Amino acid sequence: MAATFRPPKQVLLLQALRSLVYPWVGGSGSTCCLCPLGETYLRNLEEKLTQNKLILKEELRTLLHLCASRDDVELAKHVIYRYHAENRNITLGEYKFGPLFMRLCYELDLEDSAVELIKDQHLRGFFSDSTSFNILMDMLFIKGKYKSALEVLIEMKNQDLKFNKDTYVLAFAICYKLNQLAKAISIFSQIMNPESIICTNLNIMIHIQSNMLKTLIVILKDATEGNLSRFVKRHVFSEEVLVKVREKVKDVPALLAKFDELNKKLHINGQVTEYTLDALLCHTPSDRQPHTVLLNKRTVSRRTFQPLSQSLWAE
């Protein structure tokens, strides 16, 4: 008789946790809760902390996937501090815990905890990737906490982390919301794709706030007179932004007449969108991966069973 293959105990435990830790509770007003196995796992980690035992990488990763409440996240924070203290000088390979923790805070609306940890000098090196900072800045921006988002951006710079395209777009949007026009213009010049719809509309807003009205009309004129082939990407403007332009030039008859003419052309050419500027700023950038169909894309949180933000679908 052939020998029966038996998976390692650790694999069996992880499989059991994945299948049992988020059961649906029947009846109206159902809630999500950890099953006894998950609760036992968390309590065992608490005991390890109390006994000053070594925290393993897989234990921390499993814990972050199990967290379903604020209390669970408080435990995770203590485990993160212990784990980082034990491993700060060890090469940990390519796996990054930062994005996983930030997505957890995103789902549970714990942006203050995320800011606290990412700025803590004792955890310097734990959040060693731009993705962690971008997720946190996006979370703060959506909640209207622009000053906190700017502090996170400054912390990212202080930690000498490389800014990517998403970082620059977030930085631009944050400075725009804080009316820091000079910084916004400086960041605008560094965005890798100034032709994007976000950059196009923010550029218009910069000209409005700078009272550069003649240049503003020239930009709109160039947009209407460009190559109108359907195979060539054209500049698209937010209806909200165009309304602000008209409000700005209404007291200058010559500019107003020219704007109304250009505005009509933009609408005829299909170069106007109903999306507001805020909606554009909060838009999730398209995936850079090949254009293949994403099968079984998860849209509901495993922890809370609430709809996921679109930016978290790839978690």
Image (cartoon, helix red, strand yellow):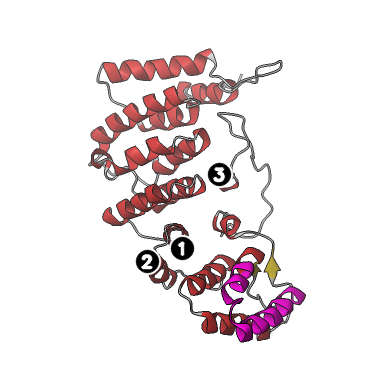
Q: Is residue 266 above or below residue 28?
A: below
Magenta part of the chain: 242-269
Q: Quadrant of the N terminus?
A: top right
Measure how far apart labels 3 and 2 are at the Cα level.
Answer: 29 Å
Amino acid under label 3?
A: Leu
Which residue is found at the position 35% from the left and 49% from the top? 152
Which residue is found at the position 32% from the left and 27% from the top? 78
Sequence-first tag of 1 and 3:
1
- Which residue is label 2 attached to? 183
Question: Mark 3: few, some, or many residues within 10 Å (few <14, many ≥20)?
Answer: some
Work out whether residue 67 or residue 95 is closer to the camera in this orientation and state it: 67
Work out whether residue 268 or residue 242 is closer to the camera in this orientation and state it: 242
Work out whether residue 98 or residue 277 is closer to the camera in this orientation and state it: 277
- On the picture, is 140 further left or further right than 225? left
Question: Mark 2: few, some, or many residues within 10 Å (few <14, many ≥20)?
Answer: some
Where residue 89 appears, as percent x and y from the top left, is 22, 42
CB contact under 8 Å: marks 3 and 2: no
Which residue is found at the position 45% from the left and 35% from the top? 110
